[in-house]
Image: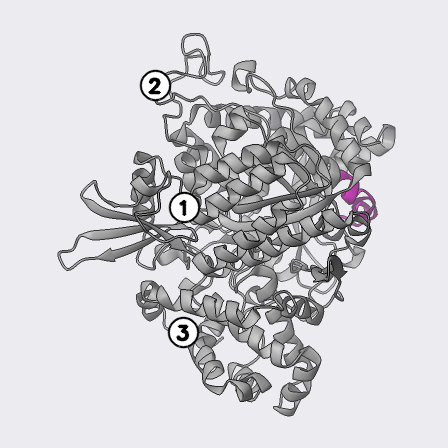
Amino acid sequence: MADTQYILPNDIGVSSLDCREAFRLLSPTERLYAHHLSRAAWYGGLAVLLQTSPEAPYIYALLSRLFRAQDPDQLRQHALAEGLTEEEYQAFLVYAAGVYSNMGNYKSFGDTKFVPNLPKEKLGRVILGSKAAQQQPEEVRDLWQTCGDLMFSLEPRLRHLGLGKEGVTTYFSGDCTMEDAKLAQDFLDSQNLSAYNTRLFKVVGQEGKSHYEVRLASVLNTDPALDSELTSKLKSYEFQGNHFQVTRGDYAPILQKVVEHLEKAKAYAANSHQEQMLAQYVESFTQGSIEAHKRGSRFWIQDKGPIVESYIGFIESYRDPFGSRGEFEGFVAMVNKAMSAKFERLVASAEQLLKELPWPPAFEKDKFLTPDFTSLDVLTFAGSGIPAGINIPNYDDLRQTEGFKNVSLGNVLAVAYATKREKLTFLEEEDKDLYIRWKGPSFDVQVGLHELLGHGSGKLFVQDEKGAFNFDKETVINPETGEQIQSWYRSGETWDSKFSTIASSYEECRAESVGLYLCLNPQVLEIFGFEGADAEDVIYVNWLNMVRAGLLALEFYTPEAANWRQAHMQARFVILRVLLEAGEGLVTVTPTTGSDGRPDARVRLDRSKIRSVGRPALERFLRRLQVLKSTGDVVAGRALYEGYAAVTDAPPECFLTLRDTVLLRKESRKLIVQPNTRLEGSEVQLVEYEASAAGLIRSFCERFPEDGPELEEVLIQLAAADARFWRDQAQEAPPGQA
C-alpha cells in the first residue's frame, strides 16, 4: 500500500455546504441569475483538470462513466463480488470523491498527489467488469489503459506539482524548466501580455533552437479575420534568440459552455453593472482577453452589496510553479446580512486602522478605496478547492487605483472551524477547550482583517510607460535604510511577475501578519462584539492558532526538493519562525511522546507576552515586508522571506524531525459536498446531498445532466491533443505501482 502521505484515509471528514436558508430567501429572478452563474462556474471548473496533470482529465472521464452507469451503492455490490473488501471499496469511493473535490488527482491544498488505497489489480477488475465497461467496452478499456498506471504511480517526480524535475504541471510542457518560465515571463512583459490565462508549450527544433507557444484560453482560435484588441498580438516573434508564437483557443469547448450560461445570466441581472460585467467576461473568454476581464472586474467592483455575488475567471496563481498563471475559478454566493453588518463597521473604521500599520504614510495608498465587504453563504465554488475568504481582483493596477472587494465565506468557515477535541493535535490540554470555544470567532476576526486590511493595504511604487512616478522620488525615504527609494516597478511589471515563485506566499504572509497585528486593537474586537476577558481570549486563540498552523505547515514542505507546496502554509511557518525568533519564551515548540508511545509535540504561547514581545517582533517584520514589496526589491525580499522559510534540523526546534511528527499525526483536510441547482420549468430548485464520499460522487454525477458524456469526450480529446508535450516526462519517470 501507499505511504499514508499519498492517500486519503477512509475516515476522512466529509461535510455538506449548507446554504438552504440563504437560497430560500432569493427571489425567483435571483435564483435564475444564481443558477446560470453556477452552471457557468461548474463548466469552467472542468478546465482545472487540464491545468493539473496529464492524466487528470482521463481519470475524471473514467470515474464519471463508471458512476453514471452504476451509482455508488450499485457498484458496491459488483466490487464485493469481484473480491474487494468493504474497506477497499470505501477507499475507492474516497479516492473518487477526492478527485472530484480537488478537480484532479493532486490535493488543492499542498499540491501532493493522492492515489487509491487498494491494489491496482483489484480496481482494474472492478472497472473492466463494470456496467460502464459492458456498455462501452472499448472506451472504458482505453481510459483505464491510459490513466491506470499514472493513477497509482508514486515515482518521485510524480508525487508533487512542480516544474521540470521538481514535479508535474500542465501549465508548462514537460520539458520546460524554471529558466524557460522566466524567459516566457520576460517575453510576455515585453508585449504587455498577462500570463493569467496562458499555458506555455516548448518544442526544440532540429537546429536545437527552442520554439515556444504561448496559448491563451479562449473560445475563438487564431483567426486573423476576427478583429479584436488581441488580433495584433496573435503572431510569431523572435525574442532573445528564441522563437515565440502567441496563439489562442485553449479549453475552447469548455469556455463555450461558460459563455452560453453567462449570456443567459445577463437576462436576470439586477442592474447595469452586472450586465456590463457579464458582457466583458463573455468578451474575455471568447477572445482570450485579460484586458476585457479587467474591464469586467471594474464593473464587479462597482456592483456594491449584491444579493447574489459571483466572480469567475483565471484567478489564483498558487499552483503555477512560477506563480503567474491563474487557475480557473468561479463562485456564486448569497449575502449573510448579520455578519456582513459587522464587516461594514470594519470597513468604516478601515482608514483609521490603516494608520496603525507600521510603515510610513507614503507606503500606503494615496486614498483608501472603500471596498464592498460581505459575508456570504456559498452556493457554488468551482475549482480545485474552497477558501474561507477572498480579496479580489488580483490585478495590481485595479487594486491600487480602482479598488477591490472582500468576501468572507460564512458557511465554509462553519465547516472549517468545526473541530473535535479528540482530533486536536500539538496543543496543551488546558488550551484545548478554550481553542474549541474561540477558534471560530477568532477566525472571523482574522479573516476580516486579513482580507480587508491585509490584502487591501500597501502601495506599490510604479513608474508608468511615460516615465511618471506615483510617488515623490525626491522626498520619500526608505525607513529601513534612511535613504531615497532606489527601486520600483517599471511599466508592464506586476507583483506576480516580479516576485514570481514567492509572490503568493509572501503576500499571504503579509496579510496574515496584518491580521495578527491589528487584532490587538480593542476597537476591532468591539466591532465583532468582544470586550474584556472574551476579547483577550479571542486574541490569544488567534495567535495560538497561527503558531500551531505554522507547525502543521511542515506537512507541505518537501525536504528532497527543499521547497514548499502551499503558499498559505509556508506563510504561517514564516510567522512561527518570526515569533520564535522574538525569544523570551513567547513561543516554544517542544517534542514529546504521546500516550500511544509515538513521537508528539506541544506548542506553547505565553499570552502575557503577546503585546510586550510578540507585537514589536511582528511590527519589525511587517514593516520590512511592506517596504520591500512597495519598492519591488526582489533581491532583498527573497533573502528575507526565503531565510525565514528555510526548514532545517538545527536546534532547538529541529524542524525536519518535527516534520516527521507532523506527518505522523496529520489529519486530512475535509472534503466538502456542494449542492446543485436544477431548472424545473421556470423555477430553480436546490438539490442537496448527504455528507459522505458517496454523496459527493452523486453530486458530480448529477452536475451535468444534459451533456455529461459529451463533456467527458471533450476532456479526453483536449488532453489527447496535447499528450505529446508530456510523453517524454512520463518516460523519464515510468509508472510504478504503489
Graded by Cα atoms within 10 Å as few (under 14), some (14 to 19) or many (20 or more), the crowding at tag 1 reads: many
Residue 379 vs residue 15, the one in the foreground: 379
In the rendered image, residue 441 lying in the magenta stretch gets the answer: yes
- Please report whichever mark, 1 or 2, sits nearer to the chain's N-terminal start: 1
Residue type (three-letter) at the residue carrying disc 1:
Phe
Toward the top, the furthest residue is 475
Q: Main secondary structure of the magenta part?
A: helix
Graded by Cα atoms within 10 Å as few (under 14), some (14 to 19) or many (20 or more), the crowding at tag 3 reads: some
| Quadrant where the N terminus is found in the figure | bottom right
Callout in the foreground (1, 2): 2
Residue under circle 3?
A: 735
Residue 732 horizontal/vertical position (percent) = 32, 68
Residue 371 horizontal/vertical position (percent) = 65, 28
Toward the left, the furthest residue is 207
**On screen, 79 above or below 428?**
below
Residue under circle 1?
A: 322
**On screen, 642 above or below 146?**
above
Residue under circle 2?
A: 466
Q: Are marks 2 and 3 in contact (CB under 8 Å)?
A: no
Cα distance, mark 2 to mark 3? 54 Å
Residue 711 horizontal/vertical position (percent) = 52, 67
Callout in the foreground (1, 3): 1
Q: How is the image coloured?
A: one colour
- The kind of secondary structure element at disc 2 is loop
